[in-house]
Image (cartoon, rainbow, N blue to C red):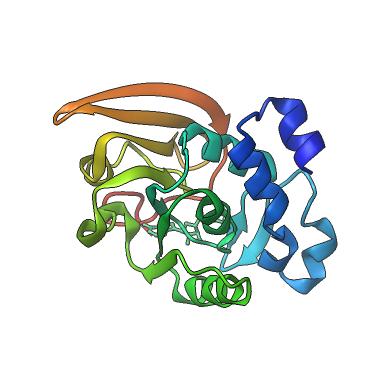
Amino acid sequence: MVERQLRNRGIQDPLVLEAMLAVPRHLFVAEALQNRAYGDCPLPIGERQTISQPYMVGYMTEALSLRGGEKVLEVGTGSGYQAAVLGRIAGKVYSVERIPELARQARRVLDRLGTTNINVKVTDGTFGWEEQAPFDGIMVTAGAPHIPEQLKQQLAPGGRLVVPVGDRLEQKVMRIVRRGVNEFSEEILLGCRFVPLIGQNGWKD
Ligand code: SAH
């Protein structure tokens, strides 16, 4: 998976490649799907949600430009796989999920792997995690109708926000960098298809 789907397609950051070599992706899907866990596609994780394609996980993680030790927020815990990858690189990961059963299952797997630097909370992540802000990196793993303003405001100076933005079916991965108190740069990186970000500042259920 790492050779063919990541390195061969241009993912270069050694921290990202090492993290994705280390995290056992099959543990984050149901037993019946484990033989497909390292395939080149997203997979269902229940509750009509999906674990992202490995390439998308690698691409978005690389886009956060982590060097190690950072404080990171993930919106959309889902299976917990992306959180585990972030946890291999960052110092602390705060991950929020709106569906309690998914958060519980993710917590079980993360505990089983012995991770100690990942916090999971059930909440509407379109508000971010105010008490823990600011973050050096924020990754949204669901498709947003627009760049969530609350998340921008929870970025540390120089912090990066990586978020799919578009309509309910298709989005573009965007990277927003906080350049100053009220100064942000925006880049469009890559087309993608995520499940919708549902919440107060996202799509309606
Ligand atoms: N990062 C996940 C993939 C998640 S799929 C993984 O590695 O498996 C997107 C997830 O975002 C779903 O679990 C969905 O329930 C969740 N989600 C959607 N809207 C949300 C919101 N407003 N706050 C928190 N989680 C949300």
The front one of 137 and 57 is 137
Residue lying at the far left of the rendered structure:
181
Could you tell me which residue is drawn at 42 percent across and 37 percent down? 162
Where is residue 183? Give x, y as percent: 19, 24
Count of number-bearing discs: 0
When asked about the image quadrant of residue 136, the answer is: top left
Q: Is residue 88 above or below residue 16?
A: below
Could you tell me which residue is drawn at 29 percent across and 54 percent down? 128
The front one of 84 and 75 is 84
For the N terminus, give its image quadrant: top right
Could you tell me which residue is drawn at 62 percent across and 55 percent down? 51
Where is residue 67? Give x, y as percent: 47, 38
Where is residue 187? Give x, y as percent: 40, 21
Residue 99 visible in the shown view: yes
Q: Is residue 169 above or below residue 30?
A: above
Q: Is residue 104 above or below residue 124?
A: below
Could you tell me which residue is drawn at 25 percent across and 58 percent down? 132
When asked about the image quadrant of residue 62, the answer is: top right
Residue 53 visible in the shown view: no
Residue lying at the far right of the rendered structure:
35
Instruction: Decide if residue 177 is on the left or right side of residue 95.
Output: left
The front one of 44 and 80 is 80
When asked about the image quadrant of residue 93, the answer is: bottom left
For the C terminus, give its image quadrant: bottom left
